[in-house]
């Protein structure tokens, strides 16, 4: 079975290519010079020049060892059977082919290397090695070329796999960052709905009062105008900050401003009362700061959205807010307001997503929410887990 590489080998740099050619030329010349003095007593003749020409041809053929690995390796090693100067090129092409780790290529290459080595020792008359020594040396060369090439190929594949994993991890990290940014923008959109709906409903209610009530005193008109101005200013400030966050570059991290929790509930109720809505709080949990920030923040937004809905659809009614529960169980939140028979429907536009957003908030933290209409009015109940 072939051991296919994880990725094609990377192109060689000039430096990497140069030392491979240098190694092949230096090895071939060294063996050729040794052959000149040992076998021919330093006399150059036609055979030695042909030997040198075969070595030059083997080095030239190395140029195509990656495009045609098996044919080049076979041809150069066949040249090495006759030419001592082609030994370096034969070794380089054999190792290069073995890096591919494909047995259908390695087996014929190893066979040719072994046969060429045995044949080389038999065509040179001055070699007096025993047949067993020739065979063992040929096996050693064949095994060394194959093992070296397979080791280089395995290491190359390992490095390629590690690089691929690192790149994949970087892409996954970028994807997680993008998903986090998308989730944060969705959270900001929900916050924008909750905050701006509350502020703008106050503006719309007081503006409507100024439009329909003609007998207001100057002090009442000034008070309503001040409420409109204050809430419009807060709405613009909230909108400016939200848009600033949405326009922030992805790689620019901005700290979140502190989000209100149940500790800020009295201020919200006081603001709602000053706008003309009668709100009663029944606190059965005692210390509002006892609830965790996550639970407190979501409970605060649920109450804020419920008060906004009551102000839109049930004006001039009393809204009852009930908090009960304890640590280790759950926080039960209930907002109730009566339905006015024949009441004028509010002209303040609504998105229709308020109750959907409240349900989503509850489910995201492991709770659930119900909204029903009974004989006493409209009721929103939420059960939020309260860890011990």
Image (cartoon, rainbow, N blue to C red):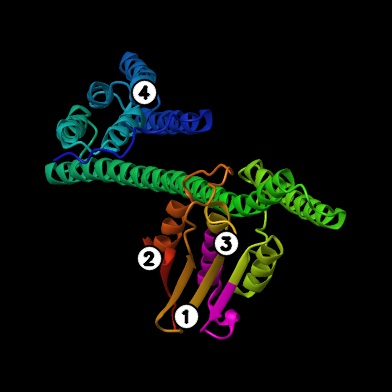
Query: In whole angstroms, how far apart are the C-alphas of marks 4 and 3?
Result: 78 Å
Camera-nearest label, 4 or 3: 3
As drawn, which residue projects farthest toward the right? 218
Q: Which residue is mark 4?
A: 62
- Residue numbers of the magenta segment: 280-306
Q: Nearer the viewer, mark 4 or mark 1?
A: 1
Q: Indicate yes or no whether the magenta region holds residue 19.
A: no
The x, y position of residue 386, in whole percent, is 44, 77
Gap between marks 1 and 2 measured at Cα:
22 Å
Helix, strand or loop for disc 2: loop
Residue 304 is marked as: 3
Q: Label 3 crowding class (10 Å Cα cut-off): few <14, some 14-19, many 20+?
A: many
At mark 1, the secondary structure is strand
| Quarter of the figure that contains the C terminus | bottom left
Q: Which mark is residue 375?
A: 2
Q: Are marks 4 and 2 in contact (CB under 8 Å)?
A: no
Q: Which residue in the protein does label 1 denote? A: 324
How many C-alpha atoms fall within 10 Å of the one at disc 2: few (<14), some, or many (≥20)? few
- Mark in front: 3 vs 2: 2
- Name the element at disc 4: helix
Does 301 appear in magenta? yes
Q: Main secondary structure of the magenta part?
A: helix
């Amino acid at each position: 079975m072939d051991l296919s590489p994880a990725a094609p080998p990377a192109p060689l740099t000039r430096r990497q290519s140069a030392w491979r050619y240098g190694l092949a030329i230096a090895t071939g010349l060294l063996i050729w010079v040794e052959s000149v003095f040992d076998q021919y007593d330093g006399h150059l003749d036609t055979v030695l020049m042909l030997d040198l020409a075969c070595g030059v041809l083997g080095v030239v053929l190395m140029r195509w060892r990656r495009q045609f690995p098996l044919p080049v390796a076979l041809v150069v090693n066949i040249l090495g059977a006759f030419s001592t100067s082609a030994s370096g090129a034969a070794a380089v092409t054999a190792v290069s082919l073995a890096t591919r780790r494909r047995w259908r290529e390695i087996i014929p290459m190893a066979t040719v290397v072994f046969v060429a080595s045995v044949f080389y020792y038999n065509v040179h008359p001055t070699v007096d090695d025993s047949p067993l020594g020739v065979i063992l040396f040929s096996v050693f060369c064949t095994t060394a070329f194959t093992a070296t090439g397979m080791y280089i190929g395995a290491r190359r594949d390992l490095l390629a796999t590690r690089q691929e994993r690192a790149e994949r991890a970087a892409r996954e990290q970028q994807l997680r960052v993008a998903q986090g940014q998308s989730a944060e923008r969705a959270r900001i959109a929900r916050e924008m709905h909750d905050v701006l709906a509350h502020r703008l409903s106050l503006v719309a209610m007081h503006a409507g009062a100024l439009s329909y009530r003609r007998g207001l005193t100057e002090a009442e008109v000034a008070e309503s105008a001040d409420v409109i101005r204050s809430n419009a200013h807060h709405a613009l400030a909230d909108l400016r900050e939200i848009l600033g966050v949405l326009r922030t570059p992805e790689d620019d991290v901005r700290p979140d401003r502190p989000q209100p929790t149940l500790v800020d509930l009295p201020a919200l109720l006081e603001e709602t009362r000053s706008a003309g809505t009668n709100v009663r709080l029944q606190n059965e949990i005692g210390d509002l700061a006892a609830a965790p920030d996550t639970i407190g923040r979501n409970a605060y937004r649920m109450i804020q959205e419920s008060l906004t809905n009551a102000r839109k659809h049930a004006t001039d009614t009393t809204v009852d807010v009930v908090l009960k529960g304890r640590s280790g169980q759950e926080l039960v939140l209930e907002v109730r307001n009566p339905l006015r028979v024949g009441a004028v429907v509010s002209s303040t536009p609504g998105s229709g997503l308020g109750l959907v957003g409240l349900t989503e908030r509850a489910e995201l933290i492991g709770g659930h929410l119900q909204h029903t209409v009974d004989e006493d009015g409209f009721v929103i109940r939420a059960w939020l887990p309260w860890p011990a």
